[in-house]
């Protein structure tokens, strides 16, 4: 289970998504500059980002779920949101995808009435934020 | 000056791994914290908006947002002496939350102050240190698409004009001719500074002449009418016996006297009538409509005053004040007393002086045997003669004021604005001499203005205490009886309270015209180093402060820079102590480059222009050449206006020629933040085998901090010439051996000193030619220069400067002494204060320069008569007995080998005074014994009593208006010399004769007859009158 909640801190909307596909990513945003002198001496300078992570998830969604996600993104793409990922780690931050692209990769069947039949859509979401250890997992 | 960094911050910089440098920008967005009056660089005590701090990442504990998206390379040093006026960085701030846009909408953020700090995570925030300080400049752009605010932050020495001109102050109706005219601003002791003549705000021009009659005429007419004429006996009248007396003497007034009295009365009446007729009123005055209209005012024309009213440009005169009127109806300056004596009394009566015993009535004695009546008659005649004598005396002694005439074209001012004021200096100064051009006999000479013609005052203009010379009447109206010819343009020699030390002057400029501070440590140190190189100059135009500071620092061979609103200074000829070391453990790999100073910076022909005397229209030049043979001719001309002494100009010009005529090695490299302490113009000790042998000091010319990759770009100037790996001896010449020779012997042999190109380099004047270097030994080349007159020769005397274009042969500061400017007529006490050498003794001389003119002969005859009188009074000084008919001395007398020295001052009325070398070779000791010394041997006692070396160092020219005045000057020097010799134990007159004047270190002396060191062709002793 994968939750998207917004706006923060007074959450009004929660979207539940299926677990992301394999090969999700979690990158540290901190930087390390390494300098090497003529004599071989190394020096390093770091740029901490206070635990900020750059996270990457790919989802395959039904048409209806994709529409729900699209509505969530349209409403809160500029807001701080909370993500509870499939590992039950909570993150507070912002979407950094630009643009949000829904790809229709294949048909999805069977349709479940009255929902439209249909299609399977894929989307990759980039998110940057800090882990929120205090969040209560629903 | 390296950055001031706390020990904790230094420890952070030295940490090898994991340091987290954070750039913090502080911006004061509005005027809640005014710029003026704040302590520059000091952060506010707290940081409420709109003082904002931004960092290159969020600092949650300090509530500082990470809004810095981009910041350019940081270098905060404004190298003023290097021609830089500003430094700038580009700053981009993130505004996705719109907070900055709100500030920009509500405030004019242009030119608001910005500080850029370096801080380290884990360090107390108070230990951040400043990287850059500036003000927000355009381009200042808020970008809707990027949601960013981009700006330039500039550190700049503001443009402020130094000095003053009248339109800047509160001067209603400022004279048009003064608008934009800079007031002189002088430092040290300047010579013949052209003073700025100010004119009254209200000024007109007389369109027609008008006069003021002699106000003594009426009184003199009355005196003439009261003249008593002597009685003349005409016979006896026989009286009837009833009257008691039988005889009565008959008298009439002397007819000649009566006629003269009548003539005097008539002449005065006619004079009165004629002069009154020239008291014209009204008079037209061009520009009169600007004066107060229809109000009774007093105007001044030259020295006369006129009371009346203006109606348009016509002035209706109701009263006149004669220039000689002292306010009580008497003449200001009584004329020369005249001998009292009747001119119309009977010739039989001798002149009886007033008050003499013969003048007393009780001493009158009738002729022996006279009858009683005869005695009474004689007494009556005696008394009438006395009265006549007295009344004529009173009439003749009556003071005369003369007729005053104001010519058409004369200047008209309000009486209270009449005085002519010359602005001499914006600083309260001591005036040493006032001079002006004077046209005499077709020649134009700069002569000292008598001190009685003007007064000196200090006027407080609220901001400046200005030195003024005030003339009560135009100089052009002076000395008309002796030819006039004065110009109204005056030249003032004065000493300013500021200077002559360069550092004092720089401090004055910075503190007077900028809001910045000076670093006292560096300024005080350099003050000592430049003390022997005083600056005596005046600014006669208005330059901006940046230019003035740059030019002064350059001429003083200093580097001047500003950072964090503080000026620092460094003495460039001195080898500095290293502020930091750099070796291969500090230089980032693949960043080291060996480069050279730019080709376009080469200067092989360096011309230094300078001025000793502001009255000279043309500037002097010193032309230096070096490495012409190697690099060709690359010319630069620089105006050394801060120095008025040749040796100082040559010193500085030689230094810069060495720096500019050579190609120098430069090192370019990058270092980590560990060298963040180093800034531009700091000294770094480099140990880089790729660059130089061993450790060599260099000057950081660029230190650019890149915050993105945490590195510093350095460019370092090295004192190593191209093609070499070791420092050049003269790159830092201040403290090298005093006698180290420049150009070096190697450079001379290679032809790199001077032009080095043939045939010019070996060109020399033939023996005996006037251009040949005079030698006391008789050759054409002095012994100093003889040994290396030709290419390749090696000099044995390094103190000589036989090739002027090679510069100072000893560029070291060692052994230098502080020179003083030579102030005409004020130097060495040669002319007493207030004594002018141009005093005219014979105002009637029409041909003052012709010794055979009747006037000169007459003067000589008078002097001979006075000598005879003195001799009769046993007060005769044989030294003053000058026989005008004696033969002139033979200038070719072999016993006087120095008589042939040229009288170079030239022209009529000049006296050449030769200055003598202070090294003594032959002379007389205190006991009068002859002392002969070997070359370069100094006597044990070098007191002023030890005469006289015959070597002539230089000459001083004095100019006089007449032979008499010139001789007076020489006599004065002779008297001083006599006193000098007497004070030293010489017998007066024993070893001294003639009129030869020599100046040795400012002390006037005369040489013995056999060692005369000068001649003055026009003023040999027998050709002039004392």
Image (cartoon, coloured by chain):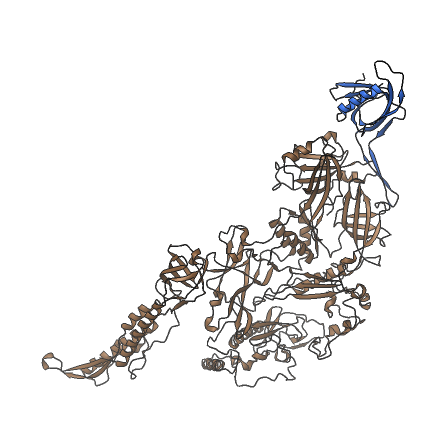
Image spot of residue B972 (x, y percent): 53, 73
Left-right relation of B888 to B568: left
Left-right relation of B742 to B906: right
Q: Is residue A19 visible?
A: no
Left-right relation of B555 to B170: right
Q: Quadrant of residue B305?
A: bottom left
Q: Relative to residue B264, is residue B82 depicted above or below?
A: above
Q: Relative to residue B989, is residue B312 depicted above or below?
A: above
Q: Quadrant of residue A55?
A: top right
Which residue is farthest top?
Answer: A113
Q: Is residue A111 visible?
A: yes
Image spot of residue B459 (x, y percent): 50, 55
Figure disc tally:
0
Q: Quadrant of residue B195?
A: bottom right
Which residue is farthest left?
Answer: B242
Q: Relative to residue B104, is residue B714 depicted above or below?
A: below
Left-right relation of B317 to B62: left
Name the one closer to the observer, B448 or B592: B592
State the brown chain.
B
Image spot of residue B536 (x, y percent): 62, 60
Image spot of residue B850 (x, y percent): 52, 80
Name the one closer to the observer, B554 or B204: B204
State the blue chain.
A
The residue under the point 60% across, 68% down is B1002
Name the one closer to the observer, B986 or B434: B434
């Amino acid at each position: 289970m994968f939750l998207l909640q917004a706006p923060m801190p007074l959450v009004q909307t929660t979207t539940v998504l299926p677990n992301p596909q394999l090969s999700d990513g979690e990158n540290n945003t901190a930087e390390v500059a390494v300098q090497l002198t003529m004599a071989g001496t190394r020096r390093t300078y770091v740029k901490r980002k206070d635990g900020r992570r750059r996270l990457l998830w790919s989802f395959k969604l039904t048409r209806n779920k994709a529409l729900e996600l699209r509505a969530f993104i349209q409403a809160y793409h500029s807001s701080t949101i909370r993500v509870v990922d499939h590992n039950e780690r909570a993150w507070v931050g912002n979407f950094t995808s630009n643009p949000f692209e829904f790809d229709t990769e294949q048909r999805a069947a069977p349709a479940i009435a009255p929902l439209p039949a249909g299609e399977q859509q894929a989307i990759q979401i980039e998110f940057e934020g800090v882990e929120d250890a205090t969040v209560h997992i629903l | 000056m390296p950055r001031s960094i706390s020990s904790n911050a230094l420890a952070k910089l030295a940490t090898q791994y994991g340091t987290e440098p954070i750039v913090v920008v502080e911006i004061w967005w509005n005027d809640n914290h005014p710029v003026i009056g704040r302590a520059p660089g000091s952060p506010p005590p707290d940081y409420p908006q709109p003082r904002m701090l931004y960092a290159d990442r969020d600092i949650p504990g300090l509530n500082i947002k990470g809004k810095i998206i981009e910041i350019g390379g940081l270098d905060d040093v404004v190298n003023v002496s290097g021609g830089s006026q500003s430094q700038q960085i580009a700053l981009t701030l993130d505004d996705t939350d719109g907070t900055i846009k709100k500030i920009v909408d509500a405030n004019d953020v242009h030119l608001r102050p910005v500080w850029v700090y370096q801080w380290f995570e884990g360090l107390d925030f108070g230990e951040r240190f400043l990287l850059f300080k500036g003000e927000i400049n355009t381009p200042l752009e808020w970008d809707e698409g990027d949601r960013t605010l981009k700006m330039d932050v500039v550190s700049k020495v503001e443009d402020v004009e130094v000095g003053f001109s009248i339109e800047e102050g509160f001067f209603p109706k400022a004279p048009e001719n003064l608008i934009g005219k800079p007031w002189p601003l002088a430092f040290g002791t300047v010579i013949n500074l052209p003073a700025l003549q100010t004119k009254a705000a209200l000024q007109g021009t007389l369109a027609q002449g008008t006069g003021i009659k002699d106000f003594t005429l009426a009184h003199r007419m009355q005196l003439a009418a009261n003249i008593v004429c002597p009685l003349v006996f005409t016979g006896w009248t026989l009286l009837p016996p009833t009257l008691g007396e039988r005889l009565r003497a008959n008298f009439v007034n002397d007819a000649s006297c009566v006629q003269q009295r009548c003539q005097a009365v008539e002449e005065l009446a006619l004079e009165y009538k004629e002069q009154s007729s020239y008291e014209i009123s009204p008079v037209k005055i061009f520009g009169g409509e600007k004066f107060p209209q229809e109000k009774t005012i007093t105007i001044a024309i030259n020295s006369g005053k006129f009371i009346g009213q203006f109606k348009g440009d016509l002035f209706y005169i109701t009263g006149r004040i004669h220039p000689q009127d002292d306010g009580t109806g008497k003449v200001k300056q009584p004329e020369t007393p005249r001998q009292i004596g009747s001119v119309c009394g009977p010739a039989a009566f001798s002149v009886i002086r007033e008050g003499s015993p013969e003048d007393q009535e009780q001493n009158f004695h009738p002729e022996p045997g006279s009858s009683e009546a005869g005695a009474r008659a004689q007494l009556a005649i005696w008394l009438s003669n006395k009265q006549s004598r007295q009344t004529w005396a009173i009439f003749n002694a009556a003071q005369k004021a003369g007729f005053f005439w104001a010519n058409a074209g004369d200047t008209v001012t309000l009486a209270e604005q009449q005085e002519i004021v010359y602005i001499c200096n914006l600083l309260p100064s001591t005036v040493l001499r006032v001079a002006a051009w004077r046209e005499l006999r077709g020649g134009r000479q700069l002569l000292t203005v008598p001190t009685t013609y003007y007064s000196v005052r200090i006027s407080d203009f609220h901001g400046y205490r200005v030195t003024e010379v005030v003339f009560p009447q135009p100089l052009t109206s002076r000395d008309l009886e002796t030819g006039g010819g004065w110009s109204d343009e005056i030249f003032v020699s004065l000493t300013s309270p500021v200077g002559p030390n360069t550092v004092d002057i720089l401090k004055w400029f910075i503190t007077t015209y900028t809001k910045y501070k000076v670093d006292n440590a560096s300024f005080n140190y350099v003050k000592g180093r430049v003390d022997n190189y005083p600056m005596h100059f005046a600014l006669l135009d208005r330059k901006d402060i940046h230019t003035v500071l740059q030019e002064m620092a350059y001429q003083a061979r200093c580097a001047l820079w500003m950072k964090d609103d503080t000026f620092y200074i460094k003495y460039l000829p001195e080898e500095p102590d290293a502020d930091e070391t750099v070796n291969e453990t500090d230089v980032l790999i693949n960043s080291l480059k060996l480069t050279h100073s730019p080709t376009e910076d080469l200067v092989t022909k360096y011309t230094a222009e300078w001025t000793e005397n502001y009255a000279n229209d043309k500037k002097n030049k010193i032309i230096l050449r070096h490495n012409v043979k190697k690099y060709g001719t690359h010319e630069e001309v620089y105006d050394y206006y801060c120095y008025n002494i040749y040796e100082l100009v040559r010193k500085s010009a030689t230094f810069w020629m060495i720096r500019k005529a050579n190609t120098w090695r430069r090192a370019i490299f990058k270092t980590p933040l560990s060298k963040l302490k180093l800034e531009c113009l700091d000294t770094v000790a480099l140990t880089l085998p790729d660059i130089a042998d061993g450790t060599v000091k260099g000057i950081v010319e660029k230190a650019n901090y890149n915050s993105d990759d945490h590195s510093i770009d350095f460019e370092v100037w090295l004192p190593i010439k191209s093609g070499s790996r070791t420092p050049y001896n003269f790159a830092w010449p201040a403290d090298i051996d005093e006698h180290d020779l420049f150009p070096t012997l190697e450079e001379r042999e290679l032809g790199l000193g001077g032009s080095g190109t043939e045939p010019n380099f070996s060109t020399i004047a033939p023996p005996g030619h006037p251009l040949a270097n005079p030698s006391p030994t008789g050759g054409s080349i002095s012994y100093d220069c003889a040994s290396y007159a030709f290419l390749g020769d090696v000099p044995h005397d390094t103190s000589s400067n036989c090739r002027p274009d090679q510069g100072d042969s000893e560029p070291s500061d060692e052994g230098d002494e502080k020179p003083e400017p030579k102030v005409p007529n004020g130097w060495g006490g040669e002319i007493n204060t207030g004594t002018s050498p141009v005093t005219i003794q014979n105002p009637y001389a029409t041909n003052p320069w012709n010794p055979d003119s009747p006037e000169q002969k007459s003067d000589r005859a008078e002097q001979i008569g006075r000598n005879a009188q003195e001799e009769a009074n046993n007060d005769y000084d044989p030294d003053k007995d000058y026989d005008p008919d004696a033969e002139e001395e033979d200038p070719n007398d072999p016993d006087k080998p120095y008589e042939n020295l040229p009288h170079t001052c030239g022209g009529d009325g000049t006296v050449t005074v030769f200055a003598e070398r202070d090294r003594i070779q032959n002379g007389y000791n205190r006991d009068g014994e002859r002392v002969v010394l070997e070359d370069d041997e100094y006597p044990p006692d070098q007191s002023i009593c030890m005469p006289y070396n015959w070597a002539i160092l230089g000459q001083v020219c004095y100019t006089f208006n007449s032979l008499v005045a010139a001789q007076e000057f020489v006599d004065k020097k002779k008297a001083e010399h006599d006193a000098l010799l007497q004070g030293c134990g010489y017998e007066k007159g024993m070893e001294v004769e003639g009129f030869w004047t020599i100046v040795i270190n400012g002390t006037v002396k005369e040489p013995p007859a056999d060692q005369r060191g000068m001649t003055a062709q026009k003023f040999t002793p027998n050709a002039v009158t004392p």
